[in-house]
Image (spheres, rainbow, N blue to C red):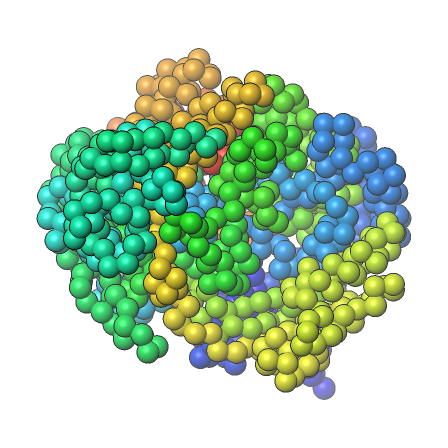
Amino acid sequence: MSTTHKVATYCYQCVNGPDMLTVEVTDGVATTVAPNFEAKGYHPADGKVCVKPYGLVQKIYNPNRLLKPLKRTNPNKGRNEDPGWIEIEWEEALDTIATRLNAIRANSLVDEQGYPRVAFTTGGAATPYFYMGTFASFLAAWGPVDQSLGAGGTVKCYHTEHVYGELWHRAFTVCPDTPRCEYIVSFGNNIDASGGVTSVRRHADARARGIKRIQIEPHLSITGASASEWLPIRPKTDPAFLYAMLHVLLHERSLADLDVPFLKQRTGSPYLVGPNGFFMRDPVSRKPLMWDAKSGGAVVFDTPGIDPVLLGEFTLAGIEVGADEQVWQHTSATAQTALEVTRRMVAPHTPEWAAQVCDIPAATIRRIATEFLEHARIGETIEFEGRTLPFRPVAVMLGKGVNNGWGAYECVWARTMLMILVGGLEVPGGLLGSTVHISGMDFDRMGSVAPHPDGFLDYPFNPTDKEHWESQPQNRHGHTTLIPIIGGGITSQLMGSTVLSWMRLQGRAAESWGKPKPPDLWFVYRCNPNISFSETDKMGETMATFPFTVAFSYTQDETNHFADLVLPEAIDLESTQLIRLGGTHYFEQFWDSQGWVLRQPVVKPQGEAKDFTWISTELAKRTGLLEAYNTMINMGAAGLPLKTEQYDFSLDVSKAHSVDETWDAVCRAASADVTGGTASDGLDYFKEKGFRVKPFPKINWYLYPRMEDLGLRFELPYQERVLRIGKQLAARLHEQGVTWWDRQLHEYEPLPTWKDLNKLWSEAYERSYGIKAKDYPFWLLTARSMQYAWGGNVSLQMIREVAANIAGHDGIMINARIAEDMGIEQGDRIEVTSPVGVTTGRALLRQGVRPDTIVMVGQFGHWKTPYAKDLDMPSLNNLVPMNMDLVDGTGSAVDAVLVKIKKIRS
C-alpha cells in the first residue's frame, strides 16, 4: 500500500524568502509542492509561494543532475576544450582539496601581494548562505578569504540604495509601507517580478483598496502593466525627472506646503554651510550651528527650545572643520542653510528643462510632483501601537537600472529628499528601510541605531585619515582602501567593485597596484559568473588561468566548465539548515512575527550528493581546523550562538559532529531564543512543526520613533561627511601615487550635481573603443523575470512552460514602429552589436518599448548548462563593457549598453 506524507521546508531562491512550503512525498518520491498553510497569519502571504518553488521537485529528478564528484583530466582550460571529466569518490575529492588547502596554510594564507590565496564566490545576493549549511563556519575558521570575485554584485543589485540608504535611514533595501501607502512614483521598480510572493500579495491588496502607482521606465514591465499610469522615460535620464520634482516642491510651492516640523526637527536642513563647504561649528564644542528664529542668532543644533530657520543666508562667527582636521576660523562669514544650498542647486532644473532631457512633458512632471505632495497628507497623524506618528502615504521607488553606476547617487539622494520634504521617511504610509548589512546585524535593524556627535546616525565608514587608512588592499578589489561607505564588515567584500577585481585580473585596471595573481584555490557555489557578469567571453578566458577551481554544482554550467573539481551537493529539498525568518527583511518582507524556519530533507539525496554541512565538517577534519570550525559554530556562525548566559547547547569542539547533531544544537538555541529560554526543543520539533516564531512589534517597521526618542536627524540634504571623506581619500590615494581612481573621487559631492549620463556613456565608449556613439543608437536594457530570477532554475522545463506565457521570454523586445521602419517582422532574427560583443535573437515587436530601447529578459546566453543552452535566449551580459570610466565612486556599474541592430534573416 502506498504511503503519503507531507514535509515542511522553505524556499530561499531569491532575497524575498524564506517562503514556507510543504512537499508531498509518496513512497519516498517527492511529488507535489504546496503552500504551508500553517503559516497563515504569520507569513505576509499566509504561507503561499511564488512560481520558483514549484520547480523544486523537477530539480530533484532532473536527468542532467551531477550525482558523483567529477575530476578534470584535461589540463588545458578553455571554452572549446573538453574538460575530460571522470567520476571519482568523495574521499579522493576531499583529500585533493585538503592537500591543496594544507599546502596553502603551510606556506602563507596570503600571497606576496597580500591577497588571500583562497577565494569564495557565490551569487543570488548572498541567498546561497541559506543553503550552504555550515560552510560559512569553515570559511571563518580558515582565515582570510577573498570574496571580491563577484558573480554580479555591484552591477546587478540595488547597490547605491544599499549604501546610501543604510547611511541615511538604515535601509540596505527600501520599501513603501504598502498596506498604508496611497501614491507611489516608481522609476523602473519592477516589484511584481522581483519582490516575491509577498510583494504580489501586498500590492494586489493595495490595488484593491485604490493605491495609485505611476510607473516611469523605458519599457513596459510586468509592474508597469498593472500601474495606474506608465511614462516611457528616455533611458538614463531619471535624475532629471527627480530633480524637476524637487524644483516644483522647492520653487513652485511655498515652504509652508512642505512638512516644516519634520524638516526642522528630524533632518539636517537647518544646518549652516560655511564658505568652504563644511558646516559652521561652535569653536568650543565643534557642534554644527543653526540659525535660531527666536534669538536671531546662531546656536548649536541641539540647543533646547530653539526654532531653526530652514531657508536663508546669514552672517556669523564660527569654525569649519575640513579634511584631515583642517580648521578655518571665521569671525564674520556668510553661511546658508543646507536646505537653502539645496534649493539653489535645483533652481535650474525646471520641468521644462527636464522635459528636454527625459522626453516626458513638463506638464506631466509638474502634475506628478503636485499629486505626490497632495497625497502626502502633511499634518495628519496616525495612532500606531500606542504612539502618535506622522501619516504620509506616499513613496518614491527606484529600480535596479537606476540604482547602479553614474547617476545612481543623484537618484537615491533626490528620491530620499522628496521623502523628507513631505515628512514621509520612516513613518506610516511612507518609505521604509527593511534591513541592514553594513551598520549592524541584518535581523536587528533597530539595534544598529547609534548617535553621531553631529546629531545624525553613526556609520562605520572605512577610515580615510592618515593614521587609520588601509593603504594595503586586503583583497583584489581593495574595498577597505577605495570605498569608505561600504565599511569593513563581514558583508562588505560583497559590495566592493567586482568590476575592478575582474579587470585587474585581466590587467586592464589599477595600473599602479599591478595585476594580481589569481587565487591558488577558488570555491564557487550556487552562481555562474561566466553567464551573470559582464564581458562573459573575457570572463571565461580569465577563469581558465586560475590554478585550481572547486565548484559545488547541480548541473554542468558555463563556470564549472573551467573547474578542476565539480562536487554534487544535496540540493534544496535534500539537506538541512535552520535560518531566521520574519521581522523586516528585504522587499515587502514586513512581518508581525520573527523566529526560525527549518529546511529539511524531503527525500534522500540523489546519487552521491552530500549535505553541505557534511562537506564542511569533512574539510575541517582534513585541514586540522575542526576545533576552530566547531568554535565558530558555537559562536554563532551557523545562525545564532549556541551558548549564552541563558542557555548552553554548544558542541564539543574536539570532535566531528553529524549533520543532525549540529543542527539539533542550533534548533535548541533557536527554541530558547524564541521562547525567552523556556523551551529547548531540537531538530525533531522543527522537523514536525517547520518553524517557530514570536511576536515582532510593528512599531519596529518604522525608524522614526527611535530617531525621535534619541533626538536624531536624518543626514539630509547635505552630505558633509561624504565631502570630508572624499577629500581625505583623494589625499591618501595621491600620497600613494594612485590617480586611476580620480574619476570616481568626483562623486564625493555634498550635494550630487546632475550629470548628462547619455553624454557620459557616449564619450566613454568613444574614448575607450574608438567608435562613434551615434552609430549605436539603441539602449539595450534587461528586465527581471520572476520565473527565472537568480538563475537557479534555468534548466527546468516546468519553469520554461510558465515563463513562456510572459512577454519577452523568447527573444528581444523592440518597438513595433521602429521594427517596421527597419524591415523587421515578428520572429525575424536580429543581430545586436555593442562596442565589445555581439549576440542574436528573435525580434519581439511591442508597443510598450521606447523607440530608442531594446530589451532582453534575464541573464541567459547559455552554451553549456543543460536545457538552458537550447532555449535560444540571448543575454546582454557579453555585450556590456567592463570599463573603469563607467564605475562610480561606490564601485558600482550598470548592466545597460549602447548597441546597434540589424536584421539577419527571417
Q: What residue sits 59% from the left and 80% below the top?
A: 676
471, above or below 311, in the image: above
Give the residue at the far top of this rendering: 770
Along the viewing direction, whichever of 628 and 227 lies nearer the viewer: 628
Residue 135 visible in this rendered orientation of the protein: no
Q: Is residue 271 left or right of residue 3?
A: left
Camera-side residue of 125 and 512: 512
Which x, y percent locates residue 655? 87, 64
Could you tell me residue 347's position as x and y percent?
Answer: 17, 34
Left or right: 564 as drawn, with respect to 740: right
Residue at (23%, 55%) from the top-left corner? Answer: 306
Q: Nearer the viewer, residue 331 or 377?
A: 331
Q: Quadrant of the N terminus?
A: bottom right
Would you place residue 251 above or below residue 133 in this image? Answer: above
Residue at 44% x, 50% y: name it.
Answer: 452
Q: Is residue 381 left or right of residue 288?
A: left
Residue nearest the viewer, comparing 795 with 443:
443
Q: Is residue 261 above or below residue 241?
A: below
Q: Is residue 706 above or below residue 624?
A: below
**In the rendered image, is residue 306 in sight?**
yes
Number of marks present in the image shown: 0
Residue depicted at x 35% and y 52%: 714
Quick one: quadrant of the C terminus?
Answer: top left
List x then y, in percent, for residue 340: 20, 39
Q: Position of residue 818 (x, y in %)?
A: 27, 32
